[in-house]
Image (tube, helix red, strand yellow):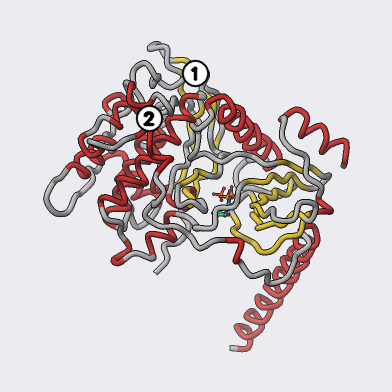
Amino acid sequence: MDDQNNETNKTLNVHRLELDNLKAIKVLGKGAMGTVFLVHDNSSPSSQFALKVVEKSLPLPGKSDPNRRARWEISVLSSIQENQKTHNTAFSFLPSILGTIETEEFIMWALPYCPGNDLNALRFQQPDHVFSPSIIRFYLAEIICALENLHGMGIVYRDLKPENILIQQSGHVTLTDFDLSCNLISKAPSTTEMCPTTAKNPQKKKPKSARVSPVDKRNLINPDGRERSYSFVGTEEYVAPEIISCEGHEFSVDWWALGVLAFEMLYGTTPFKGNNRKETYQRIVAAPPIFLGKPNLLTDLIQKLLEKDPTRRLGYQRGACEIKEHAFFKGLKWDLLTDVVRPPFIPLRHEDEVKEGELDIVEYFEKSKVSYQSTLWSTSIDEEDSKISLTEF
Ligand SMILES: Nc1ncnc2c1ncn2[C@@H]1O[C@H](COP(=O)(O)OP(=O)(O)OP(=O)(O)O)[C@@H](O)[C@H]1O
């Protein structure tokens, strides 16, 4: 195990963590691939962080391999880390990886803890479950910077949705969950030269959004010289029309998802939601978004992001710069975003978080295996019971 762990950390150039020193304080969230714990490192007293733990043998929908996806996510996080070092203050809205651990059964990696929950949870705390345009402007601006940085590294995020936007202790946002992202060799069209305003930054609770199982296909370079991916990935209500119609996609799928996200922040619902997946996809491909109330700069921005034809979508030609130049953001000092000391919502200080007890991470998975098996056992008993009563009738 030690050799494996050393090797992983050496190749990724990230800090090595010792499993024996870690105590989980609570489960922060569970996704299709991983369980995220709030963890305390006994070897360095005041250190708390989020630890994402992936079981290598976990069966995932489709042909998805958790081991491969976890390694990909770690490699994206460590490239972000490298870029953070190079660009200093830039990349503030993307997470830095604090360390990794690998055992026979698990791959784990540590990230800064975001105590403010996600944008979806925050929206549900607002009156009418919507944000005001000025708050939307702030969050969109930070998300645009995060996507600009990722695209600058040649990475398409492909899973922008409110659940993946976390609120840091400072109140600023950070993107999380990079396992669906992909690398396109041709970098995004945005460059610092094209975008002089970004000298510092080059590049009732809603149910969890339903993810589409990734179907991987090879990337192809199109005649226009831009590389596209042909994989079917994303989250149902946020997938772009070109993903559904399998025309090949690239960076502008993230600008589409930004339009869906902005619409949801404004109206409290996504623009193309149908009664089932098929209807949602039909609407994404063919139906125009319906805006309530008077048109304004925000609805104009959303309309331009929700352009069905990716080549006509805002952001296709010059990436984030085009979006930053939209009149909705007029007057916004992009370079000073990270310096904003009073973001709209600042979480309570997490150091004050009460320890409810400590969990042993490996034991936690052992126990959940046992309880999973006993659920299966009791389900089969229930089925037997209902069969018996049916026969009796
Ligand atoms: N750094 C963090 N700080 C606080 N909570 C976090 C952090 N990272 C993740 N979480 C919580 O854990 C949940 C699951 O994390 P994540 O989305 O990375 O897992 P996943 O298995 O990849 O999910 P998905 O099903 O979307 O693939 C998140 O929705 C969030 O609530």
Q: Quadrant of the C terminus?
A: bottom right
Q: Amino acid at mark 1?
A: Leu
Residue 211 horizontal side relative to residue 297, left or right: right
Location of residue 9 by image quarter: top right
| Residue 219 versus residue 18 in the image, above or below | above
Q: Residue furthest left?
A: 294
Q: Of marks 2 and 1, which one's residue comes earlier in the chain?
A: 1
Q: Residue at x 27, y 50 (%)?
A: 134
Cα separation, mark 2 vs mark 1, equals 16 Å
Q: Residue at x 75, y 71 (%)?
A: 374
Q: Nearer the viewer, residue 46 or 231?
A: 46
Task: From the image, tell me which residue sits under label 2.
Answer: 252
Q: Nearer the viewer, residue 314 or 166?
A: 166
x, y percent for residue 275: 34, 57
Q: Is residue 250 in view? A: no
Q: Residue at x 69, y 53 (%)?
A: 47
Q: Quadrant of the N terminus?
A: top right
Q: Are marks 2 and 1 in contact (CB under 8 Å)?
A: no
Location of residue 308 by image quarter: top left
Which element type, helix, strand or loop, lies under badge 1? strand
Which element type, helix, strand or loop, lies under badge 2? helix
The tag on residue 220 is 1
x, y percent for residue 330: 22, 36
Q: Residue at x 69, y 44 (%)?
A: 109
| Residue 205 versus residue 38 in the image, above or below | below
The tag on residue 100 is none
x, y percent for residue 341: 41, 48
Q: Is residue 392 in view? A: yes
